[in-house]
């Protein structure tokens, strides 16, 4: 029996237990299937916690008002720009930390962790200032009506003002994933989202001496939950719960290491700025069709993210495997890891797409009884689910490029598929040819199909194997 079938000889439950308890593994040797499993399980659970967090917010806030749901949609479209910077930096952190771990250079990995934390802090402070001072102007720019701005600007102000918690949560978890300590990242999000689930109803509807803050309460709960998780992350780093350990004396700028991080992250930041700004413009187009349609779209995207996150978790596993195996001078093993991960992600997403195509209206009805909200949200979910298998391969391939340190290729792919195709298509189909929201939904699915096709073609060329970080 081949080494790659090792996972069939041992209890899956035992491997699951090892994965979630954080047993240190060497992912550059042994069964690739086991490596994918051991990394994917905690990353999938981590991403599921993130999507549960998103759904919980919608469940509670949908009981406040349609405007409250729309506020979340508009604010998160803006805050995805924060995610773009955080994810761009985290991609660099994962790639460099994974490469150093593959090279058995734990000191170099720790230095990279410190520098990415310093960079994240500087960026987050600048964003906080804008969010605290101009929340109403931000919502107005997104096309929000005056009544929505009056009700929801506090949510925008708190979430953007406290974006340091978002930034650190992304960056430090990226360090843990790059080191192969995916279980620490998973438990971090379990803590964050567990607190959010408890605190959401308390701050939204009030409890005892705590007044009912409405949609603003969702932002308060989120920020407290994330902030607590960040404290846990820092404790894990300083006490060395995983392979990475830092000390207060390490908290100094190392120009060479930081410049390397900046160089790798620029492509990642550009890549996600392209993608997330595209989502911002799509949300702006959707706002033309009223709060009910916008609310349906927002709920559908939240439901979609619940099942998209496991595939994202698998793609993060592929990124770590690529980085560590390139560091260990095993490019063929890195490539095999990507194809296996892509196949598993496609199986999962194909199954989910069938469920969504059949039961989309039922799922939407759990969140709203407004027929316009349900109709448009269900249609959105069904059209996007039709391309789910392409989503799976596209995410794994793109993250594999990033894991190698090649953040330029995904940036090129995103530019072509989002800015040159998706946005013009959405605008023309929705507004010029008067297809309405369907035009936006179609643009999302077709763009993701195009990403998968171009990504696979470029990945097979193999230039990513020669990138140095």
Image (spheres, helix red, strand yellow):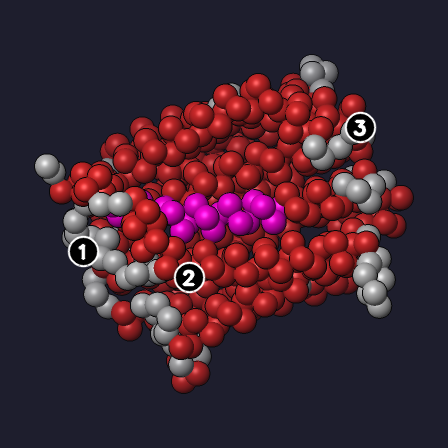
Q: Nearer the viewer, residue 417 or 369?
A: 369
The C terminus - image quarter: bottom left
Q: Is residue 161 visible?
A: yes
Q: Which residue is mark 3?
A: 370
Which mark is first along the chain, 1 or 2? 2
The image position of residue 427, as x and y in percent, is: 66, 25
Q: Which residue is mark 1?
A: 328
From the viewer's perspective, tell me whether residue 148 is left or right of residue 466: right
Query: Residue drawn 57% across and 34% down?
Result: 304
In which quadrant is the N terminus drawn? top left
The residue under the point 18% across, 55% down is 328
Q: Which residues are magenta?
A: 34-54
Q: Nearer the viewer, residue 221 or 104?
A: 221
Would residue 143 appear left or right of 47 to someone viewing this image?
A: right
Specify few, some or many for label 3: CA neighbours under 10 Å numbering under 14, 14-19, or 20 or more: some
The answer to whether residue 57 is left or right of residue 8 is right
Is 157 above or below relative to 467?
Answer: below
Local secondary structure at mark 2: helix
């Amino acid at each position: 029996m081949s080494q790659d079938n090792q996972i069939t000889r041992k209890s899956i439950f035992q491997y699951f237990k090892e994965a979630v308890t954080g047993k240190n593994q060497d992912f550059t040797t042994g069964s690739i299937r086991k490596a994918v499993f051991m990394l994917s399980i905690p990353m999938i659970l981590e991403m599921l916690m993130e999507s549960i967090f998103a759904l919980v917010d919608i469940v509670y806030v949908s009981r406040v008002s349609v405007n409250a749901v729309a506020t979340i949609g508009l604010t998160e479209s803006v805050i995805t720009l924060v995610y773009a910077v955080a994810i761009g930096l985290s991609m660099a952190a994962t790639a460099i930390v994974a490469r150093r771990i593959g090279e058995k250079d734990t000191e170099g990995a720790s230095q990279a962790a410190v520098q990415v934390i310093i960079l994240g802090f500087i960026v987050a402070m600048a964003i906080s200032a804008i969010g605290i001072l101009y929340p109403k102007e931000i919502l107005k720019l997104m096309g929000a009506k005056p009544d929505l701005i009056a009700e929801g600007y506090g949510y925008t102000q708190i979430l953007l003002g406290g974006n340091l918690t978002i930034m650190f949560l992304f960056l430090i978890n990226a360090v843990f994933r790059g080191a192969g300590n995916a279980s620490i990242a998973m438990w971090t999000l379990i803590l964050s989202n567990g607190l959010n689930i408890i605190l959401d109803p308390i701050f939204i509807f009030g409890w005892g001496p705590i007044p009912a803050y409405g949609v603003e309460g969702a932002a308060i709960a989120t920020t407290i939950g994330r902030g607590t998780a960040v404290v846990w992350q820092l404790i894990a780093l300083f006490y060395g719960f995983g392979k990475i350990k830092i000390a207060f004396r390490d908290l100094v700028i190392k120009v060479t290491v930081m410049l390397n991080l900046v160089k790798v992250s620029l492509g990642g930041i550009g890549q996600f700025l392209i993608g997330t700004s595209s989502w911002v413009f799509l949300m702006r187009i959707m706002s033309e069709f009223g709060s009910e349609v916008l609310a349906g779209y927002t709920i559908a995207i939240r439901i979609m993210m619940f099942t998209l996150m496991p595939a994202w978790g698998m793609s993060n596993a592929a990124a770590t495997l690529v980085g560590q195996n390139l560091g260990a001078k095993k490019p063929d093993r890195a490539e095999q890891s990507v194809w296996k991960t892509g196949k598993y992600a496609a199986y999962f997403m194909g199954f989910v797409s069938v469920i969504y195509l059949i039961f989309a209206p039922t799922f939407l009805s759990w969140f709203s009884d407004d027929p316009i909200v349900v109709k448009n949200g269900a249609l959105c979910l069904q059209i996007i689910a039709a391309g789910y298998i392409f989503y799976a391969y596209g995410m794994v391939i793109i993250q594999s490029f990033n894991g190698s340190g090649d953040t330029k290729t995904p940036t090129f792919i995103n530019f072509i598929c989002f800015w040159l195709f998706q946005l013009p298509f959405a605008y023309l189909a929705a507004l010029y040819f008067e297809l309405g929201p369907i035009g936006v939904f179609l643009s999302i699915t077709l763009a993701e199909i195009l990403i998968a096709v171009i990504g696979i073609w470029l990945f097979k060329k193999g230039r990513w194997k020669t990138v140095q970080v």
